Amino acid sequence: MSQRQVLQVFEQYQKARTQFVQMVAELATRPQNIETLQNAGVMSLLRPLLLDVVPTIQQTAALALGRLANYNDDLAEAVVKGDILPQLVYSLAEQNRFYKKAAAFVLRAVGKHSPQLAQAIVDCGALDMLVICLEDFDPGVKEAAAWALGYIARHNAELSQAVLDAGAVPLLVLCIQEPEVALKRIAASALSDMSKHSPELAQTVVDAGAVAHLAQMILNPDAKLKRQVLSALSQIAKHSVDLAEMVVEAEIFPVVLTCLKDKDEYVKKNASTLIREIAKHTPELSQLIVNAGGIAAVVNCIGACRGNIRLPGIMMLGYVAAHSENLAMAVIISKGVPQLSICLSEEPEDHMKAAAAWALGQIGRHTPEHARAVAVTNTLPILLSLYMSAESSEDLQVKSKKAMKSILQKCTYLPALEPFLYDAPPNILKHVVGQFSKVLPHDSKARRLFVTSGGLKKVQEIKAEPGSILQEYINGINSCYPEEIVRYYSPGYSDTLLQRVDSYQPLTQ
């Protein structure tokens, strides 16, 4: 056999290996093929090809493994059990940039599924190698490494701490300053995932100088980058007053308000979330948002959106209003109440209605003036029907009841209260009658209207326990009228009159 024939055998073997990995990588892109590949023992066949002498076979084998591991946690588990991770980690240090990208992709695909799988990646020493890849000259390698680190960090504080201890944060901050938009996005996303778990982790990201660089990218034209930047700033600001103040000091206002008009729905949502996370901490931070024109901007944003995109804006209005009478009045002046009332009526999801109910309760609970601003939008009957509806979730019923009570206890606008005399259950009726007993003694016009509208008659029909608070309120209302008027409207009085007619003996001539 000639030398050429001998070498031909090796060439055919190489060609077959190349064809095999390329075909598997291609098949792994379609979900319907995954189970068949798994049953055929694809993992054990790919593993030795990671050590192949031909670089393209190594890379394609890694790519195929990444696609399989990405599909579900069973396959990711198989990568771990197949002892493939140590080989990938070794290759991250040794191989070319194409292989590094593929190896980092496998680590990301395995680590994304669960804390346990992410921990397996940490245990095999991958973090140090991934951090070294963040310093690679190739932006694609940096991106792949940042992505893997972010997916590991997102699970919990312990894994985030491990990524931090490996020295990733300063390098991720350098990555967000690189010119490549894709790298900026992934690095910002990884910083967001690290910041979300605890104030300590967020503080480390702040100490690395991330906030100033993130704040400068709020107006970047790339929508996906803006989403990640706003998300990272939100995750930092949410933990404490100090961290929120650091974000504000990076001069994000009024720039961030322009994002509330963005074409991208998630940019709007993340901008609203950032403003909410700042507003919730203190009246001073809320006032700063008011001064920047933030309330009107959020109200307009809620009006222009539908569904979950509205949620952070709704919550933000509630947080601002909860702080003080003046801040709640700022929400009223910016026409926040009609918009929240629309959300309460329009939104099909119970959790959205519950958020709107809560926010309206925070606005209306301060003074009669605040309560009236809510009551005139016809919000109270909607809250009552949501509370009474068997189809409402428990959370929606609780929030509707609480909002209704806190508004009713301040409301002196009687036209809004009167329908409740007819429709409200006893636990709500008590508060309504209580409000009438407070207002009627001091308002002669209201007293007259209460008689002519049928309100006084309705009050006489309420069956209250003797000595109860409700009975006291009814007595308070009755004391505002002459005794014969009260008797006239009491149940059974017409029968009494008829009996008197029957028993009346006319004077005979």
Image (cartoon, rainbow, N blue to C red):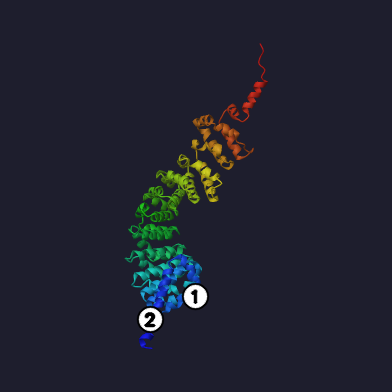
Residue under circle 1?
82
246 above or below 446?
A: below
- Which three-letter amino acid code belongs to the residue tagged 1? Gly
- Which three-letter amino acid code belongs to the residue tagged 2? Glu
Residue nearer the viewer, 392 or 25? 25
Residue 92 appears in which quarter of the rendering?
A: bottom left
Position in image of residue 424 (x %, y %): 56, 40
Residue nearer the viewer, 312 or 291? 312
- The answer to whether residue 395 of the structure is visible from this angle is yes
Taking the spot 49% from the left edge, 51% from the top edge, the residue there is 351
Alpha-carbon neighbours of circle 2 within 10 Å: few (<14), some, or many (≥20)?
Answer: few
- The answer to whether residue 152 of the structure is visible from this angle is no
Position in image of residue 333 (x %, y %): 40, 43
For residue 11, the mark is 2
The single residue placed furthest to the top in the displayed view is 509
Q: CA distance from mark 2 to mark 1?
A: 28 Å
